[in-house]
Image (tube, helix red, strand yellow):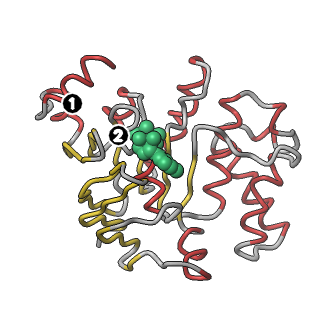
Amino acid sequence: MPLVTLEGVSKSFGKNRVLNDINLTVEAGEVVCVIGPSGSGKSTLCRCVNRLETIDEGRITFDGRPLPAEGRELARMRAQVGMVFQSFNLFAHRTILDNITLGPRRVNGVRRAEAEEKARALLERVGIADKADRLPRQLSGGQQQRAAIARALAMEPKLMLFDEPTSALDPEMIQEVLDVMRSLAASGMTMIVVTHEMGFARSAADRVVFMADGRLLEVAPPKNFFAAPASERAADFLAKVL
Ligand code: ADP
Ligand code: MG
């Protein structure tokens, strides 16, 4: 069973049609990289998947059910979707450990000791075990983004959405974050990753989705896509970024 399906999804902001008849299925365990020029609708697509945006037409399902419109059902669905953005969005006045345990404790009712034990294991996994008691500003950008990934994972999500997670990072910190994402992908996590890191898309994606002007122009395994993009738009885009 697919984990996420989008069928005929369209969305406009005023007169601006930013998603235009999007059809996409993401299987459990799959890593889908979404690439395309700025303004093509990649972030909006991500936000629609966990209903941070509503859609005008079409249907989205998560784990076999239509996205809940609101209330407790929606909160329950969102708790199963981890989201990591360009900006790290950690709580500035809380330690890294608190940042990671807050969600499980408040939303999932996990006891403090258990939440902390799990958080420390996650910090180990993302390579910043020694930063548990620091504040976010005491970490580098790459470390903060790894903490943000650990925080999302603490909720035991079924799906991870990444929206340009390395775009705000200094170049020398990009790889450490991509390495964490690569190992997450290898562990079987279902991931939708908006990225400009073509090396990551090439090596970690099961499929690459190319978007332009709100349309999904190509969906292909990275090998095929990078060797021979089917559309002129994609070929143009690749010529600029590769
Ligand atoms: P991408 O992530 O590919 O750069 P976005 O999904 O952020 O693209 O944006 C797609 C289009 O939708 C852009 O033209 C952008 O200006 C517009 N847009 C995005 N969010 C909003 C919003 N909240 N209100 C109005 N327009 C928006
Ligand atoms: Mg974006």
Q: x, y (%) of residue 174?
A: 55, 26
Q: Which residue is mark 1?
A: 234
Quadrant for the C terminus in the image: top left
The image shows residue 174, relative to residue 102, as above or below, that is: above
CA separation, marks 1 and 2? 12 Å
The image shows residue 232, relative to residue 165, as above or below, that is: above
| Residue 136, numbered circle | none
Quadrant for the N terminus in the image: bottom left
Q: x, y (%) of residue 132?
A: 82, 44
Q: x, y (%) of residue 92?
A: 83, 43
Residue at position x 61%, y 26% in the image: 169
Q: Nearer the viewer, residue 173 or 45?
A: 45
> On the picture, is 161 further left or further right than 71?
left
- Residue occupying the far bottom of the picture: 72
| Residue 159 visible in the current orientation | yes
- Residue type at tag 1: Ala
The residue tagged with tag 1: helix, strand or loop? Answer: helix
Q: x, y (%) of residue 62?
A: 40, 71
| Residue 193 visible in the current orientation | no
Q: Is mark 1 within 8 Å of ligand 1?
A: no
| Residue 40, numbered circle | 2
Residue at position x 65%, y 30% in the image: 142
Q: Nearer the viewer, residue 144 or 237?
A: 237
> On the picture, is 84 further left or further right than 15?
right
Q: Is mark 2 within 8 Å of ligand 1?
A: yes
Residue at position x 88%, y 46% in the image: 93
- Residue type at tag 2: Ser
- Among the 4 quarters of the image, the one containing residue 193: top left
